[in-house]
Each structure stands twice: as structure tokens, then as C-alpha cells.
Image (spheres, grey):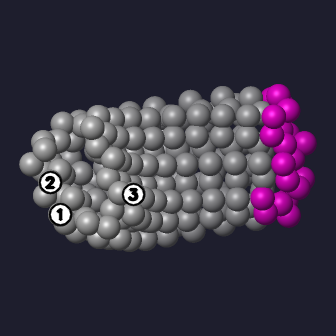
């Protein structure tokens, strides 16, 4: 069901649609999503570009495989902790800081944490199914947690505070790697290019 670009601010009418499996509420200016607690069959949910701050209701939606929450006012993502069926998650453009709730989401293959103000990414260490990871425009300096994410094919680390990229040398499945606007020496870059000869690396 698609309800995007309509300027809707009240979605209470959806409460009886308990057989919905997909729902698009992109850019509807909603803030209250409590009605979604009844829609437990949802597998795909787009709530991007709204005014949402409280996502506690989402903990009931255990069947979700794809969730888009980008460009909202979300700081607490603890409700996502039990959504273990998620394969795609977009949290870009929120002021999250703490991503420890993602630690157990081991089925994730695509994750966007762009511009979320995070610095600690240790929670990502066990997300070994990830193939695409966006960490652009944050405050990250330590990327050692990425060392074991060998299924990554796309990784964006642009606009951070990284000065040690040794953890990336074993990510040989990478096809695209963005490292621009970090504190990386030419010597380190030369070593990385040697280790990742089949990777398109962006750095300046």
C-alpha cells in the first residue's frame, strides 16, 4: 500500500488493515505511528522523510525484512533490537549516536547509517552478511569492527575521522570503497590499493 507524498498527518485509518504486508508512508509528515502495532504481517515498511521520533511500536513488527526510517527525528533505536528478520535497514539522517541495538540483526545485508552522528561502530562486528554499508558523514575513527565483514561489496566511509585503514585490507570482495575526507596517509593508501587490487577506491 502506497501513501507517499500526500501530506497525511493521521494514519489511524490503517488500524484495521491487518493483512498488509507492504506499506509506503514516505514523506507524509506523520509523527505518530502507534497504529502500526496492529499490522504485524508487514514485511516492508517505508517511513522515511517524516517527523517520527518514537519508534517503540516497531518492536511488535517481527516479520519486517525491509525498513526505511531515514530523515526523521529518531535518537533511540532500541525497539529494533528484536527485528532479526531484517535484511535491509536505512537509518540515514537521524541523530542516533548509539547503535548497539543493531548487534543482533545478523541477517542484514544492506545498512545505511549515513549522517547519524555515530562514532562507535563496534555493534557492527557480527553483521557478517552485510554486502552494502554506508557510514558516510559521521565521527568514526576506529573501524576495526569492519575487519570481519568479508561479504561487503560496497562500503562508504567518506567524511569521518579515520586515520588507520588496516582493517580493510582483508575485504577482498569490495568493488567500491569511498574513503574521501578522512585523515589517511598516502603510504596507507598505497598499501590498501595493493591489497584490494580489484576495488574502485575513492580518496582525496
- Mark 2, residue position: 190
- For marks 3 and 1, give the CA distance: 15 Å
Crowding around mark 1 (Cα neighbors within 10 Å: few <14, some 14 to 19, many 20+) is: few
At a point 81% along the width and 34% down the height, the residue shown is 5
At a point 39% along the width and 63% down the height, the residue shown is 175
Relative depth, front residue between 81 and 23: 23
Crowding around mark 2 (Cα neighbors within 10 Å: few <14, some 14 to 19, many 20+) is: few
Q: Quadrant of the C terminus?
A: top left
Percent from the top left, x then y, of residue 80? 53, 53
Sequence order check, earlier mark of 3 and 1 = 3
At a point 76% along the width and 43% down the height, the residue shown is 25
Residue 59 in view, yes or no: yes
Residue 127 sits above or below residue 181 on the image: below
- Mark 3, residue position: 176
Q: Is residue 73 left or right of residue 5?
A: left
What label sits on residue 71 in the rendered view?
A: none
- For marks 1 and 2, give the CA distance: 6 Å
Contact between marks 1 and 2 (CB within 8 A): the answer is yes
Relative depth, front residue between 98 and 37: 98
Image quarter of residue 123: bottom left
Contact between marks 3 and 1 (CB within 8 A): the answer is no
Amino acid at each position: 500500500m502506497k501513501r507517499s507524498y500526500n501530506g497525511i498527518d493521521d494514519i489511524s485509518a490503517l488500524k484495521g488493515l491487518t493483512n498488509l504486508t507492504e506499506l509506503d508512508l514516505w514523506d507524509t509528515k506523520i509523527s505518530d505511528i502507534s497504529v502500526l502495532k496492529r499490522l504485524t504481517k508487514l514485511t516492508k515498511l517505508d517511513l522515511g522523510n517524516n517527523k517520527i521520533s518514537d519508534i517503540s511500536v516497531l518492536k511488535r513488527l517481527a516479520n519486517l525484512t525491509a525498513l526505511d526510517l531515514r530523515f526523521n527525528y529518531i535518537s533511540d533505536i532500541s525497539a529494533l533490537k528484536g527485528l532479526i528478520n531484517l535484511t535491509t535497514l536505512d537509518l540515514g539522517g537521524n541523530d542516533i549516536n548509539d547503535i548497539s541495538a543493531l548487534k543482533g540483526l545478523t541477517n542484514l545485508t544492506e545498512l545505511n547509517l549515513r549522517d547519524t552522528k555515530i562514532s562507535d561502530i563496534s555493534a557492527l562486528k557480527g553483521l557478517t552478511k552485510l554486502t552494502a554499508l554506508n557510514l558516510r558523514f559521521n565521527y568514526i575513527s576506529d573501524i576495526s569492527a569492519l575487519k570481519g565483514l568479508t561479504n561487503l561489496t560496497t562500503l562508504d566511509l567518506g567524511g569521518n575521522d579515520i586515520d588507520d585503514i588496516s582493517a580493510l585490507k582483508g575485504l577482498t570482495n569490495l568493488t567500491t570503497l569511498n574513503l574521501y575526507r578522512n585523515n589517511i596517509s598516502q603510504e596507507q593508501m598505497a598499501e590498501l590499493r595493493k591489497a584490494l587490487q580489484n576495488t574502485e577506491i575513492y580518496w582525496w
